[in-house]
Image (spheres, rainbow, N blue to C red):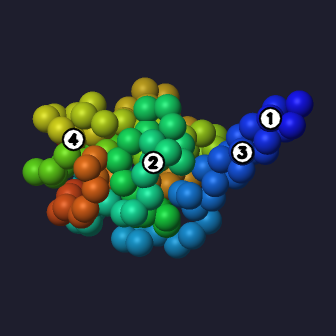
């Protein structure tokens, strides 16, 4: 019985840590943009550095991997139109993507774009706030470009 209680307490502590590791309430490191369906230029591109000291695999699990910062790298306020929403990364390093969507769910990708670059696509995107982290798969930092598009995947 004591072992079961201790195991349950550890599980709750891990869930609490996971919820606090990537904090969407913090100001994004590289800024915020508001875009509406049909925006131009497409893609909207942000130059940034990937990485951080938090292991997304340990804090979020599932398909989330890579090392990310505590605060979002970028925040997108999006008013959906009739086209899909594609968020991807272009880098010569192995990068990952972690997004907290308007529905409060975590969306993650590694290598879904070209080469070792991540990409996430919503065919019927939600309107609202997308908090975006660009991770480095093996740690460290790398130059990267975040691409937000309705037409192109990186």
Q: What residue is disc 1 on?
A: 3
Mark 1 or mark 3, whichever is nearer to me: 1
The disc at residue 137 is none
Mark closer to the chain start, 2 or 3: 3
Tell me which label, 2 or 4, sits earlier in the chain: 2
**Distance in Å between CA atoms under marks 2 and 1:** 28 Å
Residue 52: % across, % down: 36, 63
Closest to the observer, 111 or 57: 57
Residue at point 43%, 27% (across, down)? 123
Q: Tell me the quarter of the image containing the C terminus.
A: top left
Neighbor class of circle 3 (other Cα within 10 Å; few <14, some 14-19, many 20+) is few
Mark with earlier residue (2, 1): 1
Find residue 21 and report its horizontal and vertical position in percent: 56, 58
Looking at the image, residue 27 sits to the left or right of residue 53; the answer is right
Q: Earlier in the sequence, mark 4 or mark 3?
A: 3
At label 4, counting other C-alpha atoms closer than 10 Å, the crowd grade (few under 14, some 14-19, many 20 or more) is: many
CB of mark 4 within 8 Å of CB of mark 3? no
Residue 56's label in the rendered image is 2
Q: Is residue 36 visible?
A: no
Furthest-front residue in view? 2
**Residue 24: percent from left, percent from top:** 57, 60
| Disc assigned to residue 10 | 3
**Mark 1 or mark 3: which comes first in sequence?**
1
Looking at the rendered structure, the secondary structure element under dot 2 is helix
Q: Residue furthest left?
A: 92
Q: CA distance from mark 1 to mark 3?
A: 11 Å
Location of residue 36 with respect to 73 vertically, above or below: above
Image-quadrant location for residue 31: bottom left
Q: Which residue is labeled 4 in the image? A: 117
133 lies above or below 30: above
Q: CA distance from mark 2 to mark 3?
A: 18 Å
């Amino acid at each position: 019985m004591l072992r079961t209680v201790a195991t349950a307490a550890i599980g709750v502590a891990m869930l609490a840590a996971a919820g606090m590791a990537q904090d969407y309430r913090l100001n994004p490191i590289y800024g915020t943009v508001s875009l509406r369906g049909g925006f131009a230029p497409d893609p909207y591109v942000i130059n940034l550095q990937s990485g951080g000291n938090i292991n997304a695999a340990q804090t979020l699990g599932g398909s989330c991997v890579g090392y990310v910062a505590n605060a979002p790298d970028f925040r997108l306020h999006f008013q959906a139109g009739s086209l899909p929403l594609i968020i991807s990364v272009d880098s010569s390093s192995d990068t990952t993507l972690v997004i907290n969507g308007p529905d409060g769910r975590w969306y993650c990708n590694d290598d879904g774009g070209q080469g070792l670059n991540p990409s996430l696509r919503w065919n019927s995107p939600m309107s609202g706030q997308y908090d975006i982290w660009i991770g480095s798969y093996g740690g460290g930092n790398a130059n990267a470009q975040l691409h937000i598009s309705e037409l192109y995947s990186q």
